[in-house]
Amino acid sequence: MGTYGTLEERVRCPFLMNKVKTVEEVLPMFKDGMNLGWSGFTPAGYPKAVPIALADYVEENNLQGKMRFNLFIGASVGAETEDRWASLDMIDRRWPYQTGKNIAKAINEGRIRMGDKHLSLFAQDLAYGYYTKDTQSGKLDLAIIEVSGITEDGGLIPSASVGVIPEIVQTCENIIIEVNTAMPSFEGMHDVMVLHAPPHREIIGVTKADSRIGSTYVPCDPSKIVAIVESEHTDKGRSLAGADEDSIAIANHLLDFFGAEVKAGRLPGNLLPLQSGVGSIANAVVSGLANGPFYDLSVYTEVLQDGMLDLFDSGRLKRASACSLSLSENEGMPRFIKNRELYQDKIVLRPLSISNNPEVARRLGVIAMNTPVEIDMYGHANSTLINGTRIVNGIGGSGDFLRSGFLKIMHTPSSRPTKTDPTGISCIVPHAQHIDHTEHDLDIVVTEQGLADLRGLSPRDRAHAIINNCAHPDYKDILNAYFDKAEKDCLARGVGHEPQLWDCVFKMQLNNAQNGTMKINNWDVKLDLL
C-alpha cells in the first residue's frame, strides 16, 4: 500500500489487474535500440520505478553502452531517471528538451544525439509519425506512462503532468503503466482533447484559461497495456533560487509597464492570461505579481512553478491552465498537497499540444514572458546555445508563445558573472551567437536596468532602446560605440537598414572566451582583444 491508497483502489478496470507485475518482471521487455515514449513534463508526472530499476540492472551487470535507447518525452524529467541513464550511456537519441548535467555533457560531447523542437510542434509531429518514420513498424516500440489511476474502461488518469501522453498512446502498441500511489490522485484536474491529423483537425474551443473541452483522462485501448507496475516514488521537482535584487527589479519594471498599458487602454484591468517560462527568474517575476495591483488574474502557460502558489495565495490569481504542475519537491508540492482543496479546482492540466498551441495563445491574447541566454541590440534572442554551440536545455515552449502572444516579453539580467569578473558577460550583445527567436517575435525586452518597448520601432531605433534602457552600465558605452561605428559604415555604403560589421561583431564574445570578460577597449579588429 502506498502513501495515498492501494493499487486496487487506483485501477478501476478489473481486467487490467491481471497485468500487474513487479519491476523485475518488466525488465526483459526492454531491448537495445528501442524507441521509448515516456510521460512527464519537467520533473513532474514522469515514470520512475521502471527507469530506475532498468538503470540498476545495467549498472549491476556492466551493460553500460550495450543497452541504449531513443527517448521521446514531452520535456525534461527527473535527474534520477534520464540523467542517470545518460551517466550509464543508455541514451542514443533524445527529443526535444532535457535537464541534467550528465545528459547535457553527453550531448555536447556527441555521445547523445539530441534534436530540439518547439514543444507544441514536437507533440503533433510525434503523433504524425515523423520520429518513427524510418523504423520497420513506424511506431514507438514501448512506452512507460505514469498515472494516478485507470478508469473503468481503461482510460489513463495522468498524475502531475499530461505532456505527450495522448500522442504516445496513439503511436505505441505496447504500454507499461506506472500507477503512482506515493502521491495523491490528481483525478479531475485534467482536460484532455486528443487531436486528429489534418484534414480532420479539430477547432480547439478554448476561449478562456479555465475552459474545459475534453475528458479528465486519456482514452486508451486496454489491450495496449502490457504491464502495470506500482510506483512509490515521488516527483523530484527542482527547487528554485529565491528572488534576488535583479529579479525584483525586473518584476517591478514589468508591473509599471502593465500599469501604463492598462491606463492607456491597451490592456484590461486584470491584464490578459499570463504565460511564464521555467526557471528562477520566471518564478521570481510571477511571485512579484503577487504583490502587484492586479487582481482576477488568469494564467495560460506550460508549467506552474512555486511562484504560482504565491499568486493564488495572494488572492490575485483566479484560474490557471498548464501542462505540468512543476513544483519543488520539498516546498511546492507539499504546500500544494496540504492545500489541495484551495488549489485543485482552479487549475486545469492539459496535453502539450493544447497547453502550448499557438491557435489558443493568439485567441486568448497571452502575455508571454520568457528568459533567454542573450538578446542582441536588434531584438534577436538566443534561448538554447551558450557561445552558439553548447546546448543548455532546449527551446522549450518559448517560441510557441513568443510568435503568437498578445505581448511578447523576454526578461534577463543585463549581465552574468564569470570566474574572474562579476559582470563579465553582457546579456545584451551586438549580435546573438545563435538565434531562436527573431526580431519579429519580440515586443518588450526587460532587465534589472530598465525596459525597452520595441513595438513600432525600426531596427536602428530598437538598438538605441535596448542598449540605453537594458544594457548594464559597464557595457552601455561599449555597445553604443559599436552601433555608432556600424551605423556610420553601413549607411555610407547604402546597406544600413540593420547595421552590422561582420569582421568585429563577435569581438565581445571572443574576448570573453579568451579573457573571461566581454569588456573590450576598442572595436578595431586589427588590435588585441584587450
Image: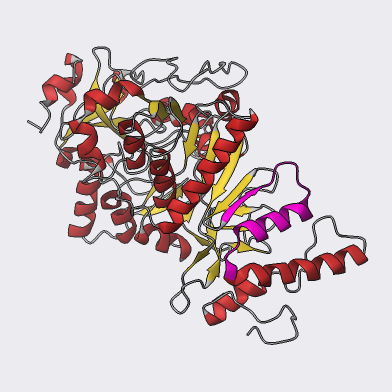
Q: Quadrant of residue 455?
A: top right
Answer above or below: position of 44 versus 191: below
Residue 46, relative to residue 97: is it above or below?
above
Q: Where does the magenta region start and end? A: 450-473
Q: Picture coordinates of residue 306 (x, y %)? A: 32, 41
Q: Is residue 178 left or right of residue 203?
A: left
Count how many numbered circles sit on residues in the image.
0
The residue lying toward the viewer, choosing from 235 and 251, is 251
Q: Which quadrant, please, contains the C terminus?
A: bottom right
Can you see residue 130? Answer: no
Judged from this view, the residue extending furthest toward the top is 153
Examine the rendering and report whether any part of residue 358 can be seen.
yes
Q: Position of residue 24 (x, y in %)?
A: 15, 42
Q: Is residue 86 above or below residue 292?
A: below
Is 468 in the magenta? yes
Find residue 241 and report its horizontal and vertical position in percent. 33, 54
Q: Tell whether 203 sits left or right of 135.
A: right
- Compared across the picture, whether 384 is left or right of 347 comes to right
Left or right of 94? Residue 518 is right
Quarter of the picture holding the N terminus = top left
Question: Residue 341 magenta-drawn?
Answer: no
Residue located at (67% from left, 87% from top): 528
